[in-house]
Image: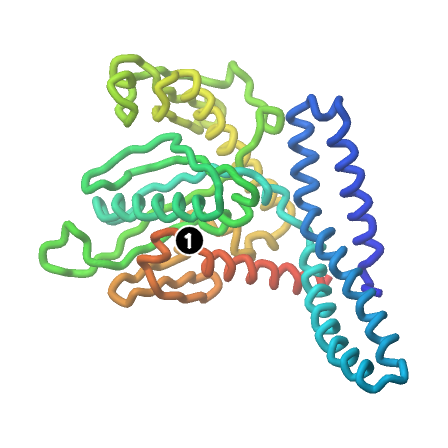
Amino acid sequence: MFPLSDKLERLVARCRELEERMADPQVAGDYTRLQELARERASLEGAVTRYDEYRRVLKQIEDARALAAEGDPDLASLAKEELTSLESRRERLEQELRLALLPRDPDDSRDVIVEIRGGTGGDEAAIFAADLYRMYTRYAESQRWDVELVDASPSGQNGFKEVVFEVRGQGAFSRLKYESGVHRVQRIPVTEAQGRIHTSTATVAVLPQVSEVEVQVKPEDLRIDIFHSGGAGGQNVNKVATAVRIVHIPTGITAVCQDERSQLKNRQKAMAVLRARLYEVERRRRDEEISQARRSQVGSAERSEKIRTYNFPQDRITDHRVGFTTHGLPRVLGGEMGPLVEALMADEQSRRLEEALAS
């Protein structure tokens, strides 16, 4: 039997307990509590599903061995062939279960707020920021996640000085968290008359979304400004003051939303961004206090760190954290980020497994 079976049995029991509690009418009426339980259950589901498959494979191995021990040579030969395949499946599942039992990032199941800002490079940096925005929105669509614009500061040449948007869907943070950091692009800008290659940057921040219960903000700590929107939304946004700027006075953290026609909706979105930013500040402080380990993981890159280069002349993308290189820039910027994300997830899992085995 797998040495971690006792722990897995406890996870199965916990999963059943969570399902029973979620079915309780009192809990079902409490949206916040129901969301917490659903998030915990989702975090256990992968390990429980694999463990169910693992137990089925163990039973099949037992049956195949019994068949191989019988006197019929033909049946014994077939059983031995099946045993080879089943043993391979068992080893694969054991490795997956070891990974599934590693401590998870508690924020992995959250929705996210993504902030992209043009860095060095003027108009070309703003154009690159728009390229990244399209890449993430198209990747989100491929994952069947919902995307909603929060705020944008357009620039010339169809670029963005800054763009902020929400991504909602199962596992959004677990797959997008690796994108935080400085992205660098090397190409001939559309603004370059002499055909010279320029290097520009854009900064990406991926923040887990949190509820009002998780991050409570005192009303007296807020300054709320209402102003006329300069963004999209038709004539209404320019005639009626609907844009909202919220400043958290103790920290100076500011959030703006002007994408909606409704002042109330803009305020709600701005508060969501503000809570996410406050939560991120606390999250980073907590991680620093706990240990140095998190800083060694690919998902915790500092925003000043250059994490990836998009080289157009050589049609090459390189992620410097894991030394992963792939080609086909148009496809990747068109939303086909799967190979990049999988390489980063695999590297983090490998690191965590090594740390777990060494402890």
> In the rendered image, which quarter contains the N terminus?
bottom right
The residue nearer to you, when weighing 35 against 67, is 67
Label 1: which residue?
Answer: 305
Up the image or down, 172 lies above or below 275; here it is below
Q: Residues within 10 Å of mark 1 (few under 14, many from 20)?
A: some
> In the rendered image, which quarter contains the C terminus?
bottom right
The residue nearer to you, when weighing 173 against 12, is 12
Specify whether 295 is left or right of 34: left
* Element type at mark 1: loop
Q: Residue furthest left?
A: 193
Specify whether 42 is left or right of 247: right
Q: Residue at horizontal 81%, vertical 53%? A: 7
Up the image or down, 72 lies above or below 23; here it is below
Specify whether 359 is left or right of 316: right
The residue nearer to you, when weighing 174 against 47, is 47
Colouring style: rainbow
